[in-house]
Image: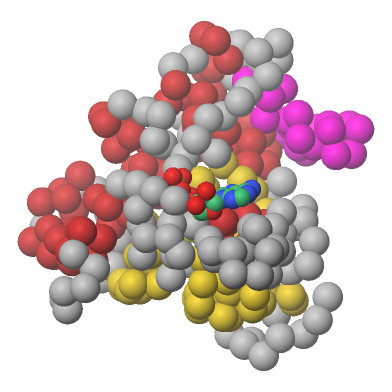
Amino acid sequence: MTEVSNKSAYVSMQGVGHRYDPRPGAPMAVQDIDLDIHRHEFVAVVGPSGCGKSTLLRMVSGLLIPSHGEVSVFNRRVTEPRDDVGIVFQKANLLPWLTVRKNVLFPLKHKYGHYTQEDEKRTDELLKMAGLTQFADKMPDELSGGMQQRVGIVRALLLNPDILLMDEPFSALDALTREQIGFDLLKIWEENPKTVLFITHSISEAVLLSDRILVMSKRPGTVLDLIEVDLPRPRTSKTINEPRFAELTDLIRGHIYEPNVPA
Ligand SMILES: Nc1ncnc2c1ncn2[C@@H]1O[C@H](COP(=O)(O)OP(=O)(O)OP(=O)(O)O)[C@@H](O)[C@H]1O
């Protein structure tokens, strides 16, 4: 691992680009991405389908090393998969033969071969924070989709990662559940701060949850804008009715649907 220059950012992308196809002249998936994310900041990424949002997330996790530029975490260049990030995907993919509590503990068991009483205590605390205490001993198929997704978030938090990477975590949920789980996530994040990179197709979800929003262009994905979400916290259902909320969503919509018109 190599030291890099920017010391203030927690996650830093400098001149990042990636071409999946190594042949010269093949199209880039993403290019010229510069982004600094600060500790405990909540950054959302929005952009058209195929613009490279998941590609960026995979680069921060170290599952993908960019063909151009550098990604660093805590001033260390990412050169291999990191085990200090929590990842939440669109589907929780819980193991159907284990209870909720055992599903949450599973990654620890898998990684270290066992878990401690302290781990069980923390699991119960996290399940409580996510409103899942009475479901701890249920099997996954006894839970709704929203509850399963909450279990997925708790599972990602158990290892107490510095960074939480979320790839369209709520997109399989109905609109009402999605809004509620967004507020639940904010509560968990406020009680248990993490640096979050959150990918979504929903502009309003990005505005409601995040501190800043990276708006990407269509492929090859590059930065169209980086927007500061200057809405006060805690965010609530009332936030959605604030004029600034509508201004910000309009601004992002304009970037995505009319990318060549100056804002
Ligand atoms: N493993 C891969 N091999 C080759 N091309 C890939 C691979 N993964 C992604 N791509 C291509 O790179 C581009 C960016 O993909 P990516 O999944 O990062 O986009 P995305 O913005 O997350 O898309 P979506 O919003 O549809 O989930 C796409 O054109 C995709 O086809």
Query: Magenta span has 211?
Result: no
Q: Position of residue 13 (x, y in %)?
A: 58, 75
Residue 108 x/y as whole percent: 80, 37
Tell whether 78 sits left or right of 7.
right
Front residue (pair 203, 263)? 263
The quadrant in which the N terminus is found is bottom right
Q: Dividing the picture into quarters, in which one does residue 7 lie?
A: bottom right
Asked whether 115 falls inside the magenta stretch, the response is yes
Residue 136 in sight from this viewpoint: yes
Residue 185, image x, y percentages: 43, 44
Q: Nearer the viewer, residue 109 or 72?
A: 72
Report the number of numbered marks: 0
Residue at figure coordinates x 68%, y 19% from the top left: 95
Looking at the image, which is closer to me, 130 or 103? Answer: 103
The quarter in which the C terminus is drawn is: bottom left
**Residue 257, image quadrant:** bottom left
User: Considering only vertical position in the picture, is 9 above or below 117?
Assistant: below
Residue at left offset 61%, top offset 26%: 93
User: Which residue appears at 27% of the width and 31% of the height?
Assistant: 175
Quadrant in the picture for residue 44: bottom left
Q: Is residue 115 left or right of residue 64?
A: right
Secondary structure mainly formed by the magenta segment? helix
Residue found at x 76% / y 29%: 106
> Can you say whether 187 is above or below 101 in the image?
below
| Image-based side of 68 in relation to 206, left or right | right
Please report the bounds of the magenta region as a residue range: 100-121
- The percent position of residue 187, horizontal first and vertical second, equals 41, 47
Q: Is residue 151 visible?
A: no
Residue 241 left/right relative to 24? left
Q: Residue furthest bottom?
A: 5
